[in-house]
Amino acid sequence: MDSALHPIIGQLERAAGFVHDDPAHAKLDKLDALLAQSATPPQDAALLAELLSLPNDGRHPLLSLDPQQRRRRTLESLLVQIEALARQNPVLMIFEDAHWADPTSLELVDLVLERISVLPVLLIVTFRPEFEPPWIGLPHVTAMTINRLGRHDIDAMIDRIVDNKSLPPGVREDLIERTDGIPLFIEEITKAVIEAEEDEAHRTIADIPPPRLAIPATLHASLMARLDRLGPAKEIAQIGSVIGREFSHALLEAVAQKSRVDLETELQRLIAAGLLFRHGTPPHASYLFKHALVQDAAYSTLLREPRRALHARIAQTLNEQFADIAESKPELLARHCTEAGEIERAAGFWGKAAQRSLARSALPEAIAQLRYALDQIAALPSSSELRREQVRLQVALITPLIHVKGYAARETKEAVDQAMLLVKRAEVLGEHLEDPLLPFVVLYGQWAANLVAFNADKLLELTEQFLSLAGNNRTNVMVGNRARGVSLIHAGEIASGLEYLDRALELYDPIEHRSLAARFGQDVRTTILAFRALTLWLLGFPEAAMADAGRTMSHAREFGQVPTLTHALVITSFTFILCGNSTEAMANLKEATVLADETGAVFWKAIGMASQGCAFALTGQIPSAVTMISSGLDAFRSTGSTLYTPWYLTSLAAAYAELGQFDDASHYLDEAVLTVQTTKEKWCEAEIHRIAGEIALRTAKPDVAKARTAFARALTIARSQRAKSWELRAATSLARVMRDNGERDNGRELLEPVYGSFTDRFVTRDLREAHALLDELR
């Protein structure tokens, strides 16, 4: 469940005909032969070879991709395989036991379902009732519940199993009653009966309680009895059950340490009993337990110490004799070491598995593996080396949680807080952390959580810590200045915030600091430029703001990391919206939403939806604006986030006012004011009061006095923040009221100096409206 694309990898290996002792070049030859059937492009072949952990011997192109790009391209290449096969012949694809699938495989199934609606492909997915697939309800998906068998089918099934044997009197009725129409129960318990002696038959049935009591336990007892009657073959079943549901002949032979003749005899008994299926011929065969419950039954017959010893032997065998598996699937060794009680080795393998998952952007799997590693370390006696590893793993957990859950989600904040405790413990103990950047990564995690769940006081306190700890370290000073600048801007100290952003931008070195994206979530320069664009607009430099937004996007695309691009697309959309450029904003936000869907970034998808609503409002699509802002805001808040909530609430209030729903408009406006007071996110506070004034003028009984007070308040706030663009909007609104009330000269005297302070002309909607109004007033 925590091994990314596990079933897909297994299918490709089987389809290519890989065997255990194939050298790497032979496996590559087999893979090439398989992919030739679907005319696979060289780039896709390179990705699929990498997915199978095969080295590039020069036959495939070298791909320079970050983990998210690699993941996205790999999933796309798998989809292309299905399309290519479907062009040749109709395709049947069966995906069994979806309830046990890893998250990345389930994401691939989602993508396949979208793609095959126009292809000659039948996809059958089986799963237990507790699994809730997101596909039910799609027009090309049919859901079928497999019910219990009726009497006629049960009789037919029993007849097929007993063949020409006869059942003792009364046994058939007892079987029918006690197996409850469940096919596996019918089959296994019938076989248990006919395998028993005639005089044991009644006792076997008597031992089976009616289905209303404990049917699974009944099946377990039946399977245990069947295994006991297999003699030495039972041991082989036990070894296989410890390896897993499916296992190779080569690994079984290495672990079992039996002669080939004895091993084959005992395997044949298990196959003849219907407990194991075999694919291929030894020594290249693989085996599969008929059902997970058969594996469970065999596993449960082992006492604790023999079971642990078997797990240890399997881990050792994998490590020493199956180096390719040990390297490509460290999670297998981690599981066996965990069950063997070899805790320190298990932690190491879980950590290695997590690093592989992170490299492939299999983030949910990486989160699970990192947690397993940390759980193992927590069970060990503390030592300096283990404490260092614990800090490293705990810090590594933060970034995937940010991407999957969100910056301010409970799980993310808990991970950050735990990392901070571990770092402080190391400081108290005087232990040197091998990576000097770790304390800053943790502090940054705390800062990011408080930015997204906006808390101005805590933010400014954390950024002071950042800068005081940074010393003369160029990297730390740059990150500290960036954090300080972003914090000040959103707290309403806009001009001061720009100074810090400019300092951070001067310190950025494209070579030295490129690798920081993996530590801090996104490329630092790109994020500085994105926030600087917003800041420049606020300060009254819209042309410069648009230029910075363009530089942000160019740099983000050139940088080639999905989180960086997603951040750039969303944050620059704010600048485009505020400048009145709905086309550019919507294009960015649609692209960001696609990326967020692909990477499972709930936070960015939510903020993208809410921002799309603001872009809809610009084009007069008010009902769509209300829907998108409301849905996005709900999803955003579900991640624990409040950042930009005042702006979204104000936009929502304005949209409701456009629809004439003034009670709703007032409600959301009041909520925006309260949010500003609570969190101290003040960068758009002036606009809240301006919108309040506009709404006061639109009601059935316009309240001009209330509007003038609100506009005056907006002007005061904008001037105190040196937010020229908000000041222009407020001055335009108030000058319009003055015009309508015969105060043309006062309106012109108010608006003219504000408009005159802008060196850019006619580049934004606000400037065009102000210019047109001034023409009237003159």
Image: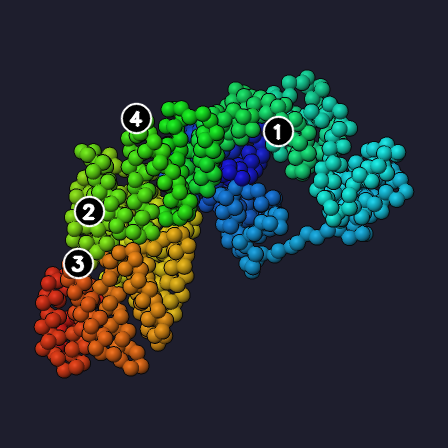
Dot 3: few (<14), some (14–19), or many (≥20) neighbours within 10 Å? many
Of residue 45 and residue 747, the one placed in the foreground of this image is 747
- Which mark is in front, 4 or 3? 4
Question: Which three-letter amino acid code belongs to the residue tagged 1?
Answer: Val
From this viewpoint, is residue 329 visible?
no
- Which mark is in front, 4 or 1? 4
Residue 313, horizontal then vertical, whole percent: 58, 21
- The residue wearing badge 4 is 430
Residue 617, horizontal then vertical, whole percent: 32, 67
Q: Compute the Cα span from label 2 to label 1.
A: 57 Å
Which image quadrant: the N terminus? top right
- Which residue corresponds to the image point at 22% horizontal and 46% vertical from the top-left? 484
Q: Compute the Cα span from label 4 to label 1.
A: 43 Å
- Which residue corresponds to the image point at 37% horizontal and 63% vertical from the top-left? 629
Horizontal arrangement in the rendering, residue 713 relative to residue 170 (left or right): left
Vertical order, 749 against 475 (above or below): below
Q: Compute the Cα span from label 4 to label 2.
A: 34 Å
- The residue wearing badge 1 is 242
Of residue 406 and residue 752, the one placed in the foreground of this image is 406
- The residue wearing badge 2 is 501
